[in-house]
Image (cartoon, rainbow, N blue to C red):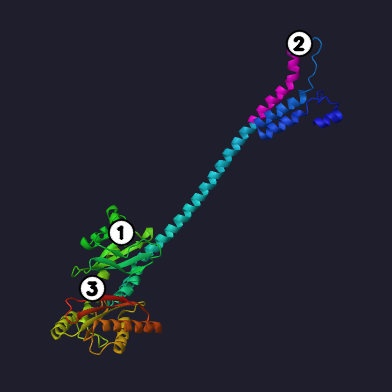
Amino acid sequence: MLLLDWGIGGGSRFADVSPHPFWIIVLLASSYYGTSTGLAAAALSAGALLIGNLPEQGFGEDHSAWLLRISAEPVLWAITAVTLGEIHSRQQRVRDELKHERDQAREAALSITQAYENLTRITRDLEVRVASQAQTIHTTYLASRAIDQQTGDDVLAGVADFIQSIMAPKKFSLFLLNNDVLEMITAEGWVQGDTLRTEIDKASPLYEEIVSHRRILTITDPKHETSLAGQGLLAGPLVNAETNQLIGMLKIEELKFADLNPSTLHNFQLACDWIGMSFTRARRVEQFVESLCVDSVGQILPATLFDRQRALFAERSQRSDYNASVLFLRIESQASGGSHRRATIDRAIQHIADRVLPSSGLRFSLRGTQWDYAILLPDVHSTLANDLGQRFMNLLKEESNRGGQFGEASYLVETVHQGSLPRADLKEYAA
């Protein structure tokens, strides 16, 4: 604008123009950018107007009148800048408040939408849950058949279907009591990284509550929460109601929050009682079978005869002073198949034993103890028994490679009598 003045205005800086063109700058700056920018524009306009261009004081003009004459327009610019600037600031605050209210309204609408969707989902889940709780006699009967089996292995195989049918947990596990330790036998839903324990001993408060007090524990009870110690939501003992014999523990580690209710607790207690009775019945059948002279394979003697035969074996070897050894075998199958699978393993063991071991050896099935099989070897030195055990392991590996699906295997040679040795010599080898 000053260039325009120098070009066509004669260099008077529009002193004779009214209203002064600098008003445009002040008005625009104040209206669009506020008080601070407006005052800065007023100050720059005043400087551009007066610096080096002060009008001369007239003859007979009072000094105060002269000051008023040269400062009147800059003062009006400043006043206008403040007035319009504050109006602009007020409008800006109103816009900010409206924007904030708009954002809050959007958030409220979003929250209401999410709450509605959650309510719809919960309602749908409750409808499904109510419908699922309306169990018919036929459904309960089908669920019970999953564990109503004649062997412990078959009961274990059916536990998962049974629990899913009546409770549908995401994670659960079954423990059996073995030598004062609750050992995990089967689990569903466990993933790598879980801090769930596979063995629970006497030092654990959970062991005390389950084994000693026979209590059903739930995470909703603060006292029970301490005993559970992050190991599950529900835990209950597996007890035979007829004999009061403790068999193990059923534990639920993860369950939908909506399913944790009194009805679920009742179903959980029912499941514990039912599984306990099924295990007891299956063990009774297995004990009856083992009480027979020989098992279904026909050449492996039952465990009930082992201790007596070993005692006679040791007595005769010491009296006659000949070598006597016992070969113990442990075989873990990678596939489960109940009594049929056990018979298959027995036949495989029998076949390998016929190839490796002397025919004079007595063979026993020791399932349910530390070892699966034991073979009494008369007139066999411990060194030879160890060689026989190693050959047995090699043939077992060959059988597994041909589809036998055996897991880890190990053997132990016990020297019952060897000349005049004062005590037994135990050596364990892993295959």
Residue 211 x, y percent position in the rendering: 23, 63
Three-letter code, disc 3: Thr
Which amino acid type is marked by label 2? Asp
Q: Secondary structure at mark 2?
A: loop
Quadrant assignment, res 275: bottom left
What secondary structure is the stretch in magenta mostly built from? helix
Which residue is outermost to the left?
Answer: 319
Density class for disc 1 (Cα within 10 Å; few <14, some 14-19, many ≥20) is few
What span is colored magenta in the figure? 64-86
> Is mark 1 in CB contact (under 8 Å) with mark 3?
no
**In what element is the residue under mark 3?**
helix
First-in-chain label (3 vs 2): 2
| Quadrant containing the C terminus in the rendered view | bottom left
Of helix, strand and loop, which one carries label 1?
A: helix
Q: Where is mark 3, residue-wise?
A: 280
Where does residue 83 sit, x and y in percent of width and height? 66, 27
Label 2: few (<14), some or many (≥20) within 10 Å? few
| Whole-percent x, y for residue 333 in the image | 34, 78
Asked if disc 3 and disc 2 are in contact, CB closer than 8 Å, the reply is: no
Q: Residue at x 82, y 31 (%)?
A: 3
Q: Which mark is residue 262?
A: 1
User: Compared with residue 7, is residue 197 higher up or lower down, i.e. above or below?
Assistant: below
State the residue in front, 255 or 372.
372
**Is residue 252 in the magenta section?**
no
Residue that label 2 marks: 62
The residues bearing labels 1 and 2 have C-alpha atoms spaced at a distance of 101 Å
User: Could you say which quadrant of the image residue 43 lies in?
Assistant: top right
- 3D distance between C-alphas at marks 3 and 2: 123 Å
> Which dot, 1 or 2, sits closer to the camera?
2
Q: Amino acid at mark 1?
A: Pro
